[in-house]
Amino acid sequence: MAVDVFPWTKSKPRNTQPRSVAGTRKHKCGQAHANLSTHTREGSFPNMAFSLCLRSPIISLLLHFLLVVSTLCPVHSSQFGNHPVANQTFRPKEELRKLNAVRARLQQINKPPVKTIQSPDGDIIDCVMSHKQPAFDHPLLKGQKPLDAPERPRGHNQMDDDLSEKFQLWSLSGEWCPEGTIPIRRTREEDILRASSVGRFGMKKTLNRVRRDTSGNGHEHAIGYVTGDTYYGAKASINVWAPVVENPSEFSLSQMWVISGSFGDDLNTIEAGWQVSPGLYGDRYPRFFTYWTTDAYQATGCYNLLCSGFVQTNSKIAIGAAISPTSSYQGGQFDISLLIWKDPKHGNWWLEFGGGSLVGYWPSSLFSHLRDHASMIHFGGEIVNSGLSGSHTSTQMGSGHFAEEGFGKASYFRNMQVVDWDNSLIPLSNLKVLADHPNCYHIQGGFNKAWGNYFYYGGPGRNVKCP
Protein backbone atom coordinates (compact mmCIF):
# COMPACT_ATOMS: atom_id res chain seq x y z
CA MET A 1 0.00 0.00 0.00
CA ALA A 2 1.34 3.42 -0.88
CA VAL A 3 0.69 6.58 1.06
CA ASP A 4 0.84 9.34 -1.55
CA VAL A 5 2.00 12.52 0.09
CA PHE A 6 4.75 13.84 -2.16
CA PRO A 7 6.06 12.84 -5.61
CA TRP A 8 8.29 9.80 -5.68
CA THR A 9 12.02 10.17 -5.52
CA LYS A 10 13.83 7.60 -7.58
CA SER A 11 17.24 6.33 -6.51
CA LYS A 12 19.82 5.27 -9.05
CA PRO A 13 21.90 2.13 -8.46
CA ARG A 14 25.57 2.81 -8.14
CA ASN A 15 27.89 1.01 -10.50
CA THR A 16 31.37 0.15 -9.36
CA GLN A 17 34.24 -0.95 -11.56
CA PRO A 18 36.77 -3.44 -10.16
CA ARG A 19 40.34 -2.35 -10.37
CA SER A 20 43.22 -4.62 -11.09
CA VAL A 21 46.90 -3.88 -10.55
CA ALA A 22 49.47 -5.67 -12.64
CA GLY A 23 53.21 -5.50 -12.27
CA THR A 24 55.60 -5.45 -15.25
CA ARG A 25 59.04 -7.01 -15.43
CA LYS A 26 61.40 -5.29 -17.81
CA HIS A 27 64.03 -7.98 -18.41
CA LYS A 28 64.20 -10.00 -21.59
CA CYS A 29 62.45 -13.09 -20.30
CA GLY A 30 59.62 -11.01 -18.91
CA GLN A 31 59.42 -9.34 -22.31
CA ALA A 32 59.39 -12.76 -23.91
CA HIS A 33 56.44 -13.79 -21.80
CA ALA A 34 54.67 -10.55 -22.64
CA ASN A 35 55.39 -11.27 -26.30
CA LEU A 36 54.12 -14.79 -25.75
CA SER A 37 50.72 -13.56 -24.65
CA THR A 38 50.62 -10.94 -27.40
CA HIS A 39 51.63 -13.24 -30.21
CA THR A 40 49.43 -16.04 -28.98
CA ARG A 41 46.42 -13.77 -29.35
CA GLU A 42 47.60 -13.01 -32.88
CA GLY A 43 47.94 -16.69 -33.75
CA SER A 44 51.80 -17.03 -33.72
CA PHE A 45 54.28 -18.34 -31.16
CA PRO A 46 57.60 -16.66 -30.25
CA ASN A 47 59.69 -19.81 -30.16
CA MET A 48 63.06 -18.10 -30.28
CA ALA A 49 62.55 -15.65 -27.42
CA PHE A 50 60.95 -18.27 -25.24
CA SER A 51 63.60 -20.91 -25.85
CA LEU A 52 66.38 -18.43 -25.10
CA CYS A 53 64.99 -17.96 -21.62
CA LEU A 54 64.76 -21.69 -20.98
CA ARG A 55 68.27 -22.38 -22.30
CA SER A 56 69.95 -19.87 -19.99
CA PRO A 57 71.68 -21.90 -17.21
CA ILE A 58 71.03 -19.21 -14.61
CA ILE A 59 67.34 -19.03 -15.43
CA SER A 60 67.09 -22.81 -15.55
CA LEU A 61 68.69 -23.08 -12.09
CA LEU A 62 66.38 -20.38 -10.74
CA LEU A 63 63.30 -22.13 -12.11
CA HIS A 64 64.34 -25.41 -10.46
CA PHE A 65 64.93 -23.59 -7.17
CA LEU A 66 61.50 -21.92 -7.29
CA LEU A 67 59.87 -25.25 -8.11
CA VAL A 68 61.45 -26.92 -5.05
CA VAL A 69 60.53 -24.00 -2.77
CA SER A 70 56.94 -23.95 -3.99
CA THR A 71 56.47 -27.64 -3.22
CA LEU A 72 58.04 -27.42 0.26
CA CYS A 73 56.67 -24.06 1.43
CA PRO A 74 53.05 -22.97 1.58
CA VAL A 75 51.96 -20.08 -0.59
CA HIS A 76 50.45 -17.13 1.26
CA SER A 77 47.95 -14.94 -0.49
CA SER A 78 46.53 -11.58 0.55
CA GLN A 79 43.63 -11.97 -1.83
CA PHE A 80 41.68 -14.89 -3.22
CA GLY A 81 39.34 -14.11 -6.08
CA ASN A 82 37.29 -11.09 -5.14
CA HIS A 83 37.31 -11.93 -1.44
CA PRO A 84 40.17 -10.47 0.65
CA VAL A 85 41.79 -13.04 2.92
CA ALA A 86 44.30 -11.82 5.47
CA ASN A 87 47.40 -14.02 6.04
CA GLN A 88 45.64 -17.14 4.82
CA THR A 89 47.54 -20.17 3.63
CA PHE A 90 46.50 -21.37 0.19
CA ARG A 91 45.72 -25.09 0.41
CA PRO A 92 44.59 -26.51 -2.94
CA LYS A 93 42.83 -29.57 -1.48
CA GLU A 94 40.83 -27.49 0.99
CA GLU A 95 39.91 -24.95 -1.67
CA LEU A 96 38.78 -27.73 -4.01
CA ARG A 97 36.72 -29.28 -1.23
CA LYS A 98 35.11 -25.90 -0.50
CA LEU A 99 34.40 -25.30 -4.18
CA ASN A 100 32.73 -28.70 -4.47
CA ALA A 101 30.66 -27.92 -1.36
CA VAL A 102 29.59 -24.58 -2.86
CA ARG A 103 28.54 -26.24 -6.11
CA ALA A 104 26.63 -28.95 -4.24
CA ARG A 105 24.81 -26.29 -2.22
CA LEU A 106 23.96 -24.36 -5.39
CA GLN A 107 22.43 -27.53 -6.85
CA GLN A 108 20.28 -27.90 -3.72
CA ILE A 109 19.03 -24.31 -3.82
CA ASN A 110 18.73 -23.56 -7.55
CA LYS A 111 16.09 -25.78 -9.10
CA PRO A 112 15.84 -26.26 -12.90
CA PRO A 113 13.77 -23.37 -14.32
CA VAL A 114 11.23 -23.49 -17.11
CA LYS A 115 11.84 -19.79 -17.74
CA THR A 116 14.44 -17.21 -16.67
CA ILE A 117 13.85 -13.47 -16.22
CA GLN A 118 16.60 -10.83 -16.03
CA SER A 119 15.83 -8.16 -13.43
CA PRO A 120 16.93 -4.52 -13.97
CA ASP A 121 18.93 -4.66 -10.72
CA GLY A 122 21.04 -7.62 -11.91
CA ASP A 123 19.06 -10.40 -10.22
CA ILE A 124 18.17 -13.51 -12.18
CA ILE A 125 14.67 -14.81 -11.46
CA ASP A 126 14.09 -18.50 -12.18
CA CYS A 127 10.54 -19.74 -12.81
CA VAL A 128 10.44 -23.16 -11.12
CA MET A 129 7.59 -25.66 -11.14
CA SER A 130 5.84 -25.20 -7.80
CA HIS A 131 6.02 -28.89 -6.85
CA LYS A 132 9.79 -28.85 -7.43
CA GLN A 133 10.58 -25.89 -5.15
CA PRO A 134 13.14 -26.29 -2.30
CA ALA A 135 10.43 -26.74 0.37
CA PHE A 136 9.64 -30.25 -0.79
CA ASP A 137 13.20 -31.44 -0.19
CA HIS A 138 12.35 -31.39 3.53
CA PRO A 139 11.88 -34.93 4.93
CA LEU A 140 8.51 -33.96 6.42
CA LEU A 141 7.26 -32.46 3.14
CA LYS A 142 8.54 -34.86 0.48
CA GLY A 143 5.91 -35.82 -2.08
CA GLN A 144 3.55 -33.04 -1.08
CA LYS A 145 2.15 -30.26 -3.25
CA PRO A 146 1.24 -26.66 -2.31
CA LEU A 147 -2.06 -26.37 -0.44
CA ASP A 148 -5.04 -24.29 -1.52
CA ALA A 149 -5.68 -20.87 0.01
CA PRO A 150 -7.11 -20.94 3.56
CA GLU A 151 -9.81 -18.82 5.14
CA ARG A 152 -8.61 -15.28 5.93
CA PRO A 153 -8.99 -13.86 9.44
CA ARG A 154 -12.24 -12.03 10.12
CA GLY A 155 -11.88 -8.27 10.02
CA HIS A 156 -9.33 -8.41 7.19
CA ASN A 157 -10.08 -6.19 4.21
CA GLN A 158 -8.81 -7.55 0.90
CA MET A 159 -7.85 -5.06 -1.79
CA ASP A 160 -6.47 -5.09 -5.34
CA ASP A 161 -3.96 -7.93 -5.75
CA ASP A 162 -2.53 -6.37 -8.90
CA LEU A 163 -1.06 -3.43 -6.98
CA SER A 164 0.46 -5.78 -4.40
CA GLU A 165 2.37 -7.73 -7.01
CA LYS A 166 4.14 -4.79 -8.67
CA PHE A 167 6.34 -3.67 -5.79
CA GLN A 168 9.56 -5.42 -6.85
CA LEU A 169 12.21 -4.31 -9.33
CA TRP A 170 12.16 -7.55 -11.30
CA SER A 171 8.48 -6.99 -12.17
CA LEU A 172 9.49 -3.84 -14.09
CA SER A 173 10.85 -6.16 -16.81
CA GLY A 174 7.23 -6.74 -17.85
CA GLU A 175 7.73 -10.51 -17.78
CA TRP A 176 6.06 -12.96 -15.41
CA CYS A 177 6.42 -16.59 -14.50
CA PRO A 178 3.99 -19.04 -16.15
CA GLU A 179 1.04 -20.51 -14.27
CA GLY A 180 2.08 -23.45 -12.12
CA THR A 181 5.54 -22.01 -11.42
CA ILE A 182 6.98 -19.74 -8.72
CA PRO A 183 9.69 -17.04 -9.11
CA ILE A 184 12.89 -17.76 -7.19
CA ARG A 185 15.86 -15.38 -7.00
CA ARG A 186 18.85 -17.34 -8.30
CA THR A 187 21.69 -17.87 -5.82
CA ARG A 188 25.20 -17.40 -7.23
CA GLU A 189 28.56 -18.78 -6.22
CA GLU A 190 29.72 -15.41 -4.87
CA ASP A 191 26.64 -15.23 -2.62
CA ILE A 192 27.69 -18.40 -0.81
CA LEU A 193 31.36 -17.40 -0.66
CA ARG A 194 30.40 -14.28 1.32
CA ALA A 195 28.91 -16.43 4.10
CA SER A 196 30.87 -17.43 7.21
CA SER A 197 30.68 -21.03 5.97
CA VAL A 198 28.96 -22.98 3.22
CA GLY A 199 26.86 -24.83 5.78
CA ARG A 200 25.52 -21.63 7.36
CA PHE A 201 24.74 -19.79 4.14
CA GLY A 202 21.28 -18.24 4.37
CA MET A 203 21.12 -18.57 8.18
CA LYS A 204 21.36 -15.95 10.89
CA LYS A 205 24.24 -16.09 13.32
CA THR A 206 23.56 -18.33 16.29
CA LEU A 207 24.03 -15.39 18.68
CA ASN A 208 21.14 -13.52 17.08
CA ARG A 209 18.41 -14.17 19.64
CA VAL A 210 15.26 -12.06 19.59
CA ARG A 211 15.39 -10.47 23.01
CA ARG A 212 13.63 -7.65 24.80
CA ASP A 213 16.79 -6.41 26.49
CA THR A 214 20.36 -5.60 25.55
CA SER A 215 21.89 -8.89 24.50
CA GLY A 216 25.43 -7.61 23.98
CA ASN A 217 25.94 -9.55 20.74
CA GLY A 218 26.00 -6.60 18.35
CA HIS A 219 22.29 -6.87 17.44
CA GLU A 220 20.40 -3.73 18.46
CA HIS A 221 16.62 -3.26 18.38
CA ALA A 222 13.87 -0.67 18.53
CA ILE A 223 10.65 -2.65 18.86
CA GLY A 224 7.01 -2.64 19.91
CA TYR A 225 5.77 -5.89 21.42
CA VAL A 226 2.83 -7.64 23.05
CA THR A 227 3.01 -10.65 25.35
CA GLY A 228 1.02 -12.43 28.03
CA ASP A 229 -1.64 -14.01 25.79
CA THR A 230 -1.99 -16.62 23.05
CA TYR A 231 -1.59 -15.25 19.52
CA TYR A 232 -2.48 -16.81 16.18
CA GLY A 233 -1.01 -14.18 13.89
CA ALA A 234 -0.16 -10.51 13.37
CA LYS A 235 -0.55 -7.75 10.82
CA ALA A 236 1.17 -4.40 10.17
CA SER A 237 2.00 -1.87 7.47
CA ILE A 238 5.77 -1.26 7.41
CA ASN A 239 7.35 1.91 6.00
CA VAL A 240 10.09 1.00 3.46
CA TRP A 241 13.40 2.89 3.24
CA ALA A 242 16.91 2.21 1.95
CA PRO A 243 19.06 2.75 5.07
CA VAL A 244 22.82 3.10 4.83
CA VAL A 245 24.68 -0.02 5.99
CA GLU A 246 28.26 0.84 6.87
CA ASN A 247 29.93 -2.58 6.79
CA PRO A 248 29.21 -5.62 4.56
CA SER A 249 28.99 -7.80 7.68
CA GLU A 250 26.14 -5.67 9.05
CA PHE A 251 22.47 -5.37 8.10
CA SER A 252 19.44 -3.19 8.77
CA LEU A 253 15.92 -4.62 8.78
CA SER A 254 12.32 -3.89 9.69
CA GLN A 255 10.05 -6.85 10.34
CA MET A 256 7.44 -8.73 12.36
CA TRP A 257 8.39 -11.62 14.64
CA VAL A 258 5.86 -14.31 15.61
CA ILE A 259 7.47 -16.02 18.60
CA SER A 260 6.99 -19.01 20.89
CA GLY A 261 9.18 -20.92 23.31
CA SER A 262 11.83 -19.56 25.62
CA PHE A 263 14.78 -17.41 24.63
CA GLY A 264 16.98 -20.46 25.02
CA ASP A 265 17.66 -23.24 22.52
CA ASP A 266 13.99 -24.01 21.87
CA LEU A 267 13.03 -20.59 20.46
CA ASN A 268 10.55 -20.81 17.54
CA THR A 269 10.14 -17.76 15.28
CA ILE A 270 8.40 -16.84 12.04
CA GLU A 271 9.62 -13.57 10.54
CA ALA A 272 8.85 -11.34 7.56
CA GLY A 273 9.67 -7.80 6.47
CA TRP A 274 12.32 -5.93 4.48
CA GLN A 275 16.08 -5.78 4.94
CA VAL A 276 19.28 -4.29 3.55
CA SER A 277 21.95 -7.00 3.86
CA PRO A 278 25.11 -6.70 1.72
CA GLY A 279 26.47 -9.95 3.12
CA LEU A 280 23.45 -11.97 2.04
CA TYR A 281 22.58 -10.30 -1.26
CA GLY A 282 25.78 -8.54 -2.36
CA ASP A 283 24.16 -5.10 -2.65
CA ARG A 284 22.34 -2.45 -0.60
CA TYR A 285 18.82 -2.66 -2.00
CA PRO A 286 15.95 -3.08 0.49
CA ARG A 287 14.56 -6.57 -0.11
CA PHE A 288 11.42 -8.45 0.91
CA PHE A 289 12.41 -11.39 3.11
CA THR A 290 11.15 -14.21 5.31
CA TYR A 291 12.83 -16.29 8.01
CA TRP A 292 12.03 -19.18 10.36
CA THR A 293 13.76 -21.23 13.04
CA THR A 294 12.77 -23.86 15.62
CA ASP A 295 15.99 -23.90 17.67
CA ALA A 296 17.05 -20.28 18.21
CA TYR A 297 18.84 -19.97 14.84
CA GLN A 298 21.20 -22.86 15.51
CA ALA A 299 20.62 -25.57 12.91
CA THR A 300 17.10 -25.08 11.54
CA GLY A 301 15.52 -22.53 9.26
CA CYS A 302 16.83 -19.92 6.86
CA TYR A 303 16.10 -16.77 4.92
CA ASN A 304 13.64 -16.91 2.04
CA LEU A 305 13.84 -20.15 0.03
CA LEU A 306 17.50 -20.87 0.81
CA CYS A 307 16.58 -24.15 2.51
CA SER A 308 13.61 -26.48 2.57
CA GLY A 309 10.66 -25.40 4.70
CA PHE A 310 8.61 -22.41 3.50
CA VAL A 311 6.17 -23.38 0.74
CA GLN A 312 5.61 -20.62 -1.81
CA THR A 313 2.30 -20.46 -3.68
CA ASN A 314 2.54 -17.08 -5.43
CA SER A 315 3.72 -16.83 -9.05
CA LYS A 316 4.31 -13.06 -9.07
CA ILE A 317 6.25 -12.33 -5.86
CA ALA A 318 9.90 -13.31 -5.51
CA ILE A 319 11.04 -13.60 -1.90
CA GLY A 320 14.44 -11.94 -1.55
CA ALA A 321 13.90 -9.61 -4.51
CA ALA A 322 14.45 -5.83 -4.30
CA ILE A 323 11.55 -3.54 -3.37
CA SER A 324 10.64 -0.48 -5.42
CA PRO A 325 9.73 2.29 -4.78
CA THR A 326 11.14 3.29 -1.39
CA SER A 327 10.39 6.28 0.83
CA SER A 328 12.35 9.54 0.72
CA TYR A 329 13.03 12.13 3.42
CA GLN A 330 10.31 14.81 3.32
CA GLY A 331 9.09 13.13 0.13
CA GLY A 332 6.87 10.22 -0.94
CA GLN A 333 6.18 7.56 1.67
CA PHE A 334 5.78 3.90 0.74
CA ASP A 335 4.82 1.01 3.00
CA ILE A 336 4.08 -2.68 2.64
CA SER A 337 1.33 -4.54 4.50
CA LEU A 338 2.09 -8.00 5.85
CA LEU A 339 -0.23 -10.50 7.51
CA ILE A 340 0.88 -13.75 9.15
CA TRP A 341 -1.81 -16.04 10.55
CA LYS A 342 -2.43 -19.64 11.53
CA ASP A 343 -4.94 -21.49 9.36
CA PRO A 344 -7.52 -22.95 11.81
CA LYS A 345 -8.17 -25.94 9.54
CA HIS A 346 -4.67 -27.29 8.84
CA GLY A 347 -2.61 -25.36 11.40
CA ASN A 348 -0.10 -23.93 8.91
CA TRP A 349 1.18 -20.35 9.23
CA TRP A 350 0.33 -18.34 6.10
CA LEU A 351 1.90 -15.13 4.80
CA GLU A 352 -0.05 -12.51 2.87
CA PHE A 353 1.43 -9.44 1.20
CA GLY A 354 -0.52 -6.26 0.51
CA GLY A 355 -4.27 -6.42 0.30
CA GLY A 356 -4.73 -10.06 -0.66
CA SER A 357 -1.67 -11.65 -2.31
CA LEU A 358 -0.90 -14.95 -0.61
CA VAL A 359 2.84 -15.59 -0.69
CA GLY A 360 2.86 -19.07 0.86
CA TYR A 361 3.02 -20.85 4.21
CA TRP A 362 5.24 -22.38 6.88
CA PRO A 363 3.95 -25.93 7.55
CA SER A 364 3.09 -26.44 11.23
CA SER A 365 5.08 -29.69 11.17
CA LEU A 366 8.30 -27.63 11.03
CA PHE A 367 7.77 -26.31 14.56
CA SER A 368 7.50 -27.41 18.16
CA HIS A 369 6.00 -24.51 20.18
CA LEU A 370 4.55 -22.72 17.15
CA ARG A 371 2.69 -25.87 16.18
CA ASP A 372 0.06 -24.62 18.59
CA HIS A 373 0.23 -20.81 18.96
CA ALA A 374 2.56 -17.86 19.55
CA SER A 375 3.25 -16.38 22.98
CA MET A 376 4.71 -13.06 21.83
CA ILE A 377 4.60 -10.71 18.83
CA HIS A 378 7.35 -8.21 18.00
CA PHE A 379 7.28 -5.37 15.45
CA GLY A 380 10.24 -3.11 14.70
CA GLY A 381 13.78 -2.56 13.53
CA GLU A 382 17.07 -4.35 14.04
CA ILE A 383 20.64 -3.59 13.01
CA VAL A 384 24.02 -5.25 13.48
CA ASN A 385 26.77 -3.19 15.12
CA SER A 386 29.99 -5.05 14.26
CA GLY A 387 32.23 -2.64 16.19
CA LEU A 388 35.01 -3.12 13.66
CA SER A 389 36.04 0.55 13.75
CA GLY A 390 36.23 0.65 17.55
CA SER A 391 33.20 2.94 17.71
CA HIS A 392 29.49 2.44 17.16
CA THR A 393 28.46 1.74 13.59
CA SER A 394 26.84 4.44 11.45
CA THR A 395 24.49 1.83 9.97
CA GLN A 396 21.03 3.39 9.93
CA MET A 397 17.80 1.90 11.21
CA GLY A 398 14.62 2.75 9.31
CA SER A 399 15.05 6.16 7.65
CA GLY A 400 18.20 6.94 9.62
CA HIS A 401 16.31 9.59 11.61
CA PHE A 402 15.01 9.52 15.17
CA ALA A 403 11.38 8.79 15.99
CA GLU A 404 10.78 12.35 17.25
CA GLU A 405 10.94 13.73 13.68
CA GLY A 406 7.62 12.10 12.79
CA PHE A 407 5.91 11.46 9.47
CA GLY A 408 7.89 11.89 6.26
CA LYS A 409 11.16 11.86 8.17
CA ALA A 410 11.13 8.92 10.60
CA SER A 411 10.18 5.36 9.64
CA TYR A 412 6.96 3.89 11.02
CA PHE A 413 4.81 0.82 11.64
CA ARG A 414 1.05 1.42 11.50
CA ASN A 415 -2.24 -0.48 11.83
CA MET A 416 -0.66 -3.16 14.00
CA GLN A 417 -3.06 -5.96 14.96
CA VAL A 418 -2.99 -9.54 16.21
CA VAL A 419 -5.10 -12.62 15.34
CA ASP A 420 -6.93 -14.16 18.29
CA TRP A 421 -8.08 -17.73 19.00
CA ASP A 422 -11.25 -17.15 16.96
CA ASN A 423 -9.29 -16.25 13.78
CA SER A 424 -10.22 -12.58 14.12
CA LEU A 425 -7.98 -9.54 13.70
CA ILE A 426 -8.13 -7.37 16.82
CA PRO A 427 -6.30 -4.22 18.00
CA LEU A 428 -3.25 -4.56 20.21
CA SER A 429 -3.77 -4.35 23.94
CA ASN A 430 -0.96 -3.07 26.13
CA LEU A 431 1.60 -2.42 23.38
CA LYS A 432 5.02 -1.79 24.92
CA VAL A 433 7.96 -0.14 23.17
CA LEU A 434 11.67 -0.65 23.81
CA ALA A 435 14.91 0.67 22.34
CA ASP A 436 17.93 -1.10 23.80
CA HIS A 437 20.30 1.69 22.60
CA PRO A 438 18.07 4.81 22.68
CA ASN A 439 20.91 7.24 21.96
CA CYS A 440 21.56 5.39 18.69
CA TYR A 441 18.04 4.27 17.70
CA HIS A 442 14.79 5.37 19.31
CA ILE A 443 11.06 4.51 19.27
CA GLN A 444 7.83 6.37 20.14
CA GLY A 445 4.37 4.76 20.14
CA GLY A 446 0.88 6.20 19.66
CA PHE A 447 -2.70 5.54 18.62
CA ASN A 448 -5.21 7.31 16.35
CA LYS A 449 -8.30 6.41 14.33
CA ALA A 450 -6.55 6.36 10.95
CA TRP A 451 -3.46 4.37 11.94
CA GLY A 452 -4.70 2.47 14.98
CA ASN A 453 -1.67 1.30 16.97
CA TYR A 454 1.50 2.77 15.46
CA PHE A 455 5.03 3.86 16.29
CA TYR A 456 7.90 5.79 14.77
CA TYR A 457 11.35 4.31 15.21
CA GLY A 458 14.96 4.34 13.98
CA GLY A 459 18.05 6.49 14.05
CA PRO A 460 21.45 7.22 12.51
CA GLY A 461 23.61 5.03 14.70
CA ARG A 462 26.87 6.78 15.53
CA ASN A 463 26.38 10.39 16.67
CA VAL A 464 27.49 12.70 19.49
CA LYS A 465 25.42 10.78 22.05
CA CYS A 466 26.23 7.38 20.50
CA PRO A 467 30.02 7.46 19.99
Image: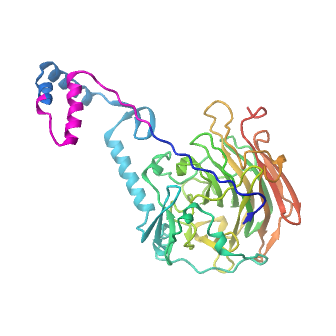
Q: Position of residue 229 (x, y in %)?
A: 80, 65
Q: Residue at x 78, y 57 (%)?
A: 225
Q: Residue at x 58, y 51 (%)?
A: 204
Q: Residue at x 69, y 35 (%)?
A: 392
Q: Which residues are magenta?
A: 19-48
Q: Work out whether residue 140 can be spotted.
A: no
Q: Residue at x 75, y 61 (%)?
A: 376
Residue 445 versus residue 347: which sits nearer the camera? 445
Q: Quadrant where the C terminus lies? A: top right
Q: Position of residue 359 (x, y in %)?
A: 61, 70
Q: How many marks?
A: 0
As drawn, the residue found furthest toward the top would be: 58
Tell me if residue 334 is in the magenta stretch.
Answer: no
Q: Quadrant where the N terminus lies? A: bottom right
Q: Is residue 240 above or below residue 435?
A: below
Quadrant in which residue 351 is drawn: bottom right
As drawn, the residue found furthest toward the right would be: 448
Q: Is residue 257 left or right of residue 47?
A: right
Q: Position of residue 17 (x, y in %)?
A: 47, 41
Residue 349 versus residue 397: which sits nearer the camera? 397
Quadrant in which residue 116 is drawn: bottom left
Q: Is residue 118 above or below residue 356?
A: above
Q: Is residue 272 above or below residue 68?
A: below
